[in-house]
Amino acid sequence: MNTSIFISPIFNDHCPQILNLILPIQQIEFNVPVTLEGQPDLLDIETHYHNTGGGFWGAKKGDELVGSIALIALGNHSGAIRKMFVKKEFRGKDIGTAQMLLQKLINHCKENGITDLYLGTVDMLKAAHRFYEKNGFAKIKSENLPVYFPRMMGENVYYHLIIN
């Protein structure tokens, strides 16, 4: 793992950096037809993530935001992973950015009594599927999601993890 990358909570003062990280990955790299208007949470991460009992974490190399992950606490000892993005040049097992972000989120869940994690993604993101499956997430059908899981436009692959 790359010890020069640090994971820490980030807040609304990081919104410009968050937008500069996430939007190009979604729109340019993966050609996902999503806009900022469809993601108002990115303009107020404190209300949408931190204030739910969840959180929003950034991976930084120096002052550069190179990755993100967020958690919405859903009640019922459950949470939803959102906004898991890592810049291309910081991806991969050798660097470990995504693994560090996920571990930070799971540690937060353990500390806060969240035992069920859910996430939605899109079928074209095969590397993401492998990453989640390698980390113990099980693919589930959409009809097996809890009714309180907040669905996002475009998602069509879902995962669940029981945290011990």
Image (spheres, rainbow, N blue to C red):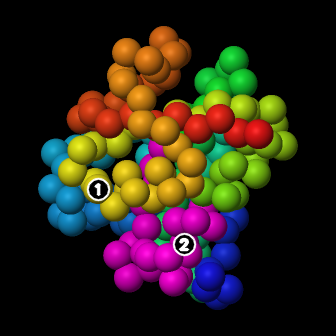
Which three-letter amino acid code belongs to the residue tagged 2?
Answer: Thr
Which three-letter amino acid code belongs to the residue tagged 1?
Answer: Lys
Q: Quick check: marks 1 and 2 in contact, CB under 8 Å?
A: no
Is label 1 or label 2 in front?
1
Figure check: 150 above or below 72? above
Residue 73 screen position, x and y as percent: 65, 31
Q: Residue at x 76, y 39 (%)?
A: 164
Apparent side of residue 2 relative to residue 27 in the rendered image (left or right): right
Q: Could you tell me how far apart the alpha carbons at marks 1 and 2 are, in whole angstroms?
A: 18 Å
Q: Is residue 136 visible?
A: yes
Q: Residues within 10 Å of mark 2 (few under 14, many from 20)?
A: many
- 127 and 44: which one is in front? 127
Residue 126 screen position, x and y as percent: 29, 56
Marking on residue 97: 2
Check if residue 84 falls in the magenta segment: yes
Q: Residue at x 21, y 59 (%)?
A: 30
Compare marks 1 and 2 and give the one earlier in the sequence.
2
Q: Residue at x 69, y 18 (%)?
A: 76
**Residue farthest top in this picture:** 147
Figure check: 131 above or below 70? below
Figure check: 28 above or below 56? below
Apparent side of residue 25 relative to residue 105 in the rendered image (left or right): left
- 4 and 140: which one is in front? 140
Q: Residue at x 38, y 82 (%)?
A: 89
| SS assignment at label 2 | helix
Which residue is labeled 1 in the image? 126
Check if residue 108 falls in the magenta segment: no
Count how many numbered circles sit on residues in the image. 2
* Span highlighted in magenta in the image: 82-101
Q: Is residue 17 visible?
A: no
